[in-house]
Image: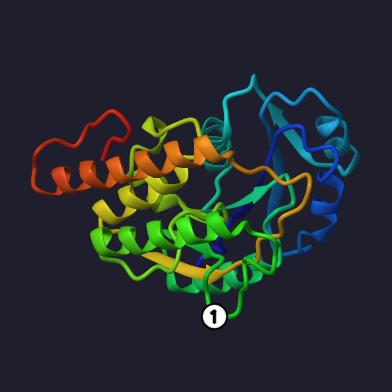
């Protein structure tokens, strides 16, 4: 008899006192083996609220999104996770997407990525700024051409990570900021791992986190550099670059 998979949810939180309680109430019950909060050095009531819900909290000094995620992934692996569901503490991504993600697990993917650009979603109606929508669509088109995988979006924050992925790619060498999101996709493609995509609704509200204009521009430029490094690594000109290690 096959051993049931262990699926752990990780809530990434930084000063999320205004959103965390509502998020926890929205997470589907009974489908994840465990949920814990990775607290990125919050200075508000985030930890107390999480503990009031009976959640385990692992805190560390502020590392940034990518740094927090790396710590959370490592902790979940140590706890025996086969798959790890990334949940954002700002309550931006609809947790109902977890149902669709778990349905995909039967296909044994290494990475499941959420997309705001599938046929049954409307990110602009959900509040996504038009300029960010257009920039993301263009970047995703460009990513698709270079990476040659048929994803509709490459820059979403809703992900499910398989143990095989995390044991196959050097994700600990990735950025401590939002660039981690794109780096790990390119690493998965480079190592020819299986990637699946599901629709996800992203709700933009006053307390949701978002990159400012200049940080968004920097992110876009760095993502293009990562594609350049990817192409160089593919032809054997090195696998260790400033922004990413393949």
- Please, which colouring scheme is shown? rainbow
Q: Position of residue 245 (x, y in %)?
A: 28, 35
Q: Can residue 105 be seen here?
A: no
Q: Position of residue 221 (x, y in %)?
A: 36, 40
Q: Can residue 58 be seen here?
A: yes
Residue placed furthest toward the right: 52
Indicate the secondary structure of the residue bearing disc 1.
Answer: loop
Q: Say if 8 sits above or below 100 in the image.
A: above
Residue placed furthest toward the front: 131
Residue placed furthest toward the bottom: 119
Q: Say if 200 sits above or below 211 in the image.
A: below
- Disc 1 designates what residue? 119
Identity of the residue drawn at 52% across and 70% down: 117
Q: Position of residue 214 (x, y in %)?
A: 51, 35
Q: Position of residue 84 (x, y in %)?
A: 56, 51
What is the quadrant of the C terminus in the image?
top left
Identity of the residue drawn at 65% across and 22% down: 60
Residue 38: quadrant of the picture = top right
Q: Nearer the viewer, residue 232 or 8?
A: 232
Identity of the residue drawn at 9% across and 38% down: 237
Q: Say if 233 sits above or below 190 in the image.
A: above
Tell me the crowding category of disc 1: few under 14, some 14 to 19, or many 20 or more residues within 10 angstroms, Cα based: few
Left or right: 101, with 27 as reference point = left
């Amino acid at each position: 008899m096959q051993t049931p998979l262990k699926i752990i949810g990780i809530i990434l939180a930084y000063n999320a006192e205004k959103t965390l309680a509502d998020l926890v109430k929205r997470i589907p019950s009974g489908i994840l083996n465990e949920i814990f909060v990775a607290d990125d050095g919050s200075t508000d009531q985030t930890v107390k609220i999480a503990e009031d819900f009976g959640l385990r909290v692992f805190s560390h000094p502020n590392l940034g999104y990518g740094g927090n995620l790396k710590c959370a992934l490592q902790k979940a692996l140590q706890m025996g996770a086969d798959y790890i569901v990334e949940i954002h503490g700002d309550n931006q991504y609809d947790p109902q997407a977890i149902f669709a993600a778990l349905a995909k697990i039967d296909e044994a993917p290494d990475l499941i990525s959420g997309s705001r650009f599938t046929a049954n979603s409307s990110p602009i109606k959900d509040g996504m700024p038009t300029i960010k929508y257009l920039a993301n669509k263009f970047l995703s088109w460009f990513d698709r051409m270079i990476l040659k995988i048929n994803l509709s979006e490459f820059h979403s924050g809703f992900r499910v990570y398989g143990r095989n992925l995390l044991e196959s790619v050097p994700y600990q060498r990735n950025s401590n900021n939002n660039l981690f999101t794109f780096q790990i996709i390119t690493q998965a493609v480079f190592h020819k791992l299986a990637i699946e995509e599901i629709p996800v609704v992203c709700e933009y509200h006053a307390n949701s986190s978002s990159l400012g204009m200049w940080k968004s521009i920097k992110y876009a430029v760095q993502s293009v550099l990562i594609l350049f490094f990817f192409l160089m690594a593919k032809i054997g000109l090195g696998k260790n670059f400033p922004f990413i290690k393949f």
